[in-house]
Image: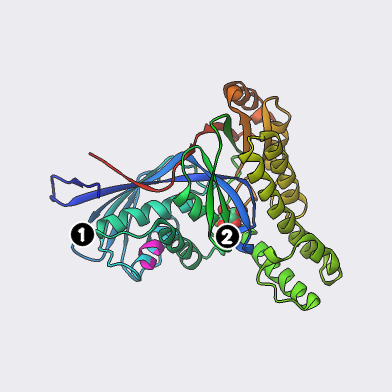
Amino acid sequence: MLATKSSETERDSFVAVAPGRVNLVGGHTDYNDGLCLPTAVDRHVAVAARPRDDDLLRVHATDFDETATIGPDDAPDGWAAYVAAVARVLREQVAVPGADLAIASDVPTGAGLSSSAALELATGRALLAAADADLPTVDLALACWRAEREGVGVECGILDQFAAGLCEPDSALFLDCRTREYEQVSLGGAVGILVIDTGVSHELADSGYNDRVRECREALSALREASGRSLDALRDVDRDLLEAHADALDAAHYRRARHVATENERVKRARDALSAGDFERVGEAMVAGHESLRDDYEVSCSELDAAVELATGTDGVYGARMTGGGFGGSAVALVDGAELGRVMDAIDARATEWVGADARVFACRPSGGVRLVDAR
Ligand code: GAF
């Protein structure tokens, strides 16, 4: 266990970091038991924890210059909600002590890069260390997923927490959200990743995210009734089944189900193409995924569409799409690694005109999941 002693208290302190993520393909499939292909990025939330004698969490968020004191039964708002929810869920499994915590981050918030899952995983890992306890990373990710659903009220799937927990450097994570099995797919070092943050901020809890989750549930139940089959999730509805019972759905519900069916196919295609080093085909799946998220799932916005158009019209870009929940946030572009600097400059030069005054462009390296770091 990595620990450093505070000279003031002679208690061990622990620092954990967890990354943000981009999702190359597989948008809004996770809560439908489907497939996705994220990669973690080299932007992190860091959480330092030092145990206290009582059961309070006294938390300082350096980016907001705010401090919250959280008792075991408190349910605060804002960033503190994530910390409180993770501690509450972990305490069902482990004797987590009170702790002084400090949070710092270079994952932009509201940018679709999953700063919330990074905060959850880093908090969880640091609190476990303070408790002198451990959990397998999959169990920690599942605890953080529950925390987000129960403590923050977002009906999300497991994509973000698994990406922040389990990604490995220079790889994408092929994740089956039904079985929770995953495999690392090497990116081979030949590609670069660019993020185009539109500057249009989104909060999942306030967006149309939960509406889409509800629409998927409604589409599933109509298809179950029409087909007489015991479908567990939209994952079980392929395009043939959907077409056979299209009459059971109104136009919007049909399009939501079609997105899920086609997106799962695209994830498999992209995984195979990535394994074969065929980045053109990965790029095609990304662009088709964006069109489906825009037209069938209706979670894009004009700034995201412009960012994708700008990227795909630039030489050296294999493909681009919105990433994350949508309604704002970022687009991700897969780029020829040898051309990364030139491509970034070309996109950056036109981002304000195409996407908006708050747009910004940065390169990311595919990075590893949550870990304790030696703070000495
Ligand atoms: C958000 C959610 F938190 C994820 O669970 C996932 O649904 C994603 O949007 C869309 O793919 O990041």
Q: Residue at x 60, y 62 (%)?
A: 31
Three-letter amino acid code at disc 2? Cys
Q: Along the horizontal axis of the image, is 137 left or right of 360?
A: left
Q: Is residue 86 magenta?
A: yes
Spatial CA distance of label 2 from label 1 is 37 Å
Q: Secondary structure at mark 1?
A: loop
Total labels drawn: 2
Quadrant in which residue 246 is drawn = bottom right
Please name the residue that numbered disc 1 is placed on: 52
**Left/right of residue 345 with respect to residue 142 in the rendered view:** right
Task: Look at the magenta stretch and give its main secondary structure.
Answer: helix
Residue 282 position in % (x across, y down): 67, 39
* Magenta span contains residue 294: no
**Local crowd at mark 2 within 10 Å, few (<14), some, or many (≥20)?**
many
Range covered by the magenta-colored residues:
85-89
Q: Which residue occupies 68% across, 29% down?
A: 353
Q: Position of residue 43 (x, y in %)?
A: 45, 39
Q: Residues within 10 Å of mark 1 (few under 14, many from 20)?
A: some
Seen at 27% across and 67% down, the residue is 95
Q: Compared to 224, does 363 lie above or below? A: above
First along the sequence among labels 2 and 1: 1
Residue 372: image location, x then y, percent = 32, 47
Residue placed under numbered mark 2 in the picture: 177
- Evaluate if marks 2 and 1 touch, with contact meaning CB atoms under 8 Å apart: no
